[in-house]
Amino acid sequence: MSFQYDERLDGPLPTHDKAALVAELGALLPDLQLLHATEDLRPFECDGLSAYRTTPMMVALPGRVEQVQALLKFATARNVPVVARGAGTGLSGGAMPLEKGILLVMARFNRILDIDPEAGTARVQPGVRNLAISQAAAPHGLYYAPDPSSQIACSIGGNVAENAGGVHCLKYGLTVHNILKVEILTIDGERLTLGSEALDSPGFDLLALFTGSEGMLGIVVEVTVKLLTRPQSAKVLLASFDDIGKAGDAVAQIIGAGVIPGGLEMMDNLSIRAAEDFIKAGYPVDAEAILLCELDGAESDVREDCDRVGALLRTAGATDIRIAQDEAERQRFWAGRKNAFPAVGRISPDYYCMDGTIPRRELARVLKGIAELSAEYGLRVANVFHAGDGNMHPLILFDANAPGELDRAEALGARILELCVAVGGSITGEHGVGREKINQMCAQFNSDEITLFHALKAAFDPARLLNPGKNIPTLHRCAEFGSMHVHHGALPFPELERF
């Protein structure tokens, strides 16, 4: 499906003579690789949310900061929108280009500039892959904690843009908790430093503001990340349940007992079967749900925590509990979870990956609600959760070639996100808003809050040239969509009362 920028809702974009812009930019930066032929632009039409596609006006692939600065100054002077892109693994349409804009691809900034084992830091360019940081730090006994499922491909610049998490974010935090400093370029090419190599820096916390801003405030050109010491020991427990509600209750009991696992993940039967068929991780395919609980730290502490968590799981109704017997089995257990998305892709022509966050206490209620919505829309849903922190990833299975199924999948996804808001949660946990969830922003925030977001955007980018039409809806869009902000705990739709 081709996604068109809605100028009626989000404001008009400037129109330029493409040939003239290409010639002028080529003359300004003769060593900049610039793609503009239609066949060269096709690979850049979307990010990981491939249901929506737009062909960019042109694609720039710089290799030096000076090229990026010159391009941004050029875009500012001519009022040309710019969308930044890293590895293109995002799942919310945040890096989807504009047909009237420049797509700025930062993939060639892929060098690890410095690793300081004594300070426990690494200084890297934005195109460095997430996993490559840990691989480079491994000889020093260090690693980078945030580990999205796409870590083999996703870039650290994209992680900063989306505030990415991963299966170990419950204990070790999201990207915002694991970076110290970013170097950015503003829309007019000015270089700024946000944060510092100290644990705190004076003034407003612009580093936290920038992290998760989805390319709307500036372009990342360098990141200083924290590195952690590898735990002495790590054990994974795999617990099977005959009821998904019992698995949800087990999560609450573990956290309530004061245990903070390194990772605490849940999968339902549909995702279990898909992952086992794909990875052969050793999952029990007859279980209605499984929990993967990783405990790490000093050897004696891990042994005690395993006994304690095992008892909690049995009390919660686990039908079977297994502990990975060696590192190879531990890696297999995690491989099944981290490959759940592509595994589900093998059992359905298409799937739509959602991303919402809920209070842990509402897990059983929301799962019941998703099951009812799944039946209402006639589409299967495979549930994969970062259960420990309430970040859920329902995968809606559909066939884009079947008339109306994509529309139904979108509508079902919207209802799931609105259910998350209704129980006190959020429309995203780590994938960002992008274009995918922009309407649901109207369900989560009121007009005053959205106006404040626009004011923050204007402070960095007054002409709205960086990634326009993403993340923050206009008030006009919310009026068209229907203002559904949850006021004073009231649910946005009466029919959601049944959940």
Image: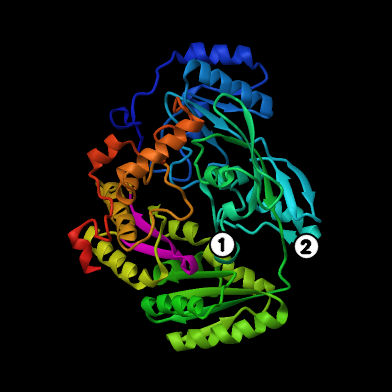
Residue at x-position 40% and y-position 65%: 383
Is residue 359 shown above or below 203? below
Q: Is residue 383 magenta?
A: yes
Residue placed most toward the observer, 290 or 79: 79
Q: Are marks 2 and 1 in contact (CB under 8 Å)?
A: no
Disc sitting over residue 169 in the figure: 1
The quarter of the picture where the N terminus appears is: top left
- 315 left or right of 128 in image: left
Q: Residue furthest front?
A: 203
Label 2: few (<14), some or many (≥20) within 10 Å? few
Is residue 256 shown above or below 376? below
Residue at x-position 66% and y-position 35%: 108
Q: Residue furthest left?
A: 494
Q: Position of residue 411 (x, y in %)?
A: 27, 51
Helix, strand or loop: magenta stretch: strand
Q: Which residue is mark 2?
A: 141
The quarter of the picture where the C terminus appears is: bottom left
Is residue 441 shown above or below 24? below
Amino acid tagged 1 = Cys
Label whose residue precedes the other's in the sequence (2 or 1): 2
Residue 286 in view, yes or no:
no
Is residue 16 shown above or below 426? above
Q: Which quadrant would residue 482 be assigned to in this image?
A: top left
Residue placed most toward the observer, 467 or 347: 467
Q: Position of residue 268 (x, y in %)?
A: 41, 70
The residue stretch that appears in magenta: 380-399
Residue at x-position 62% and y-position 52%: 152
Residue 305 in view, yes or no:
yes
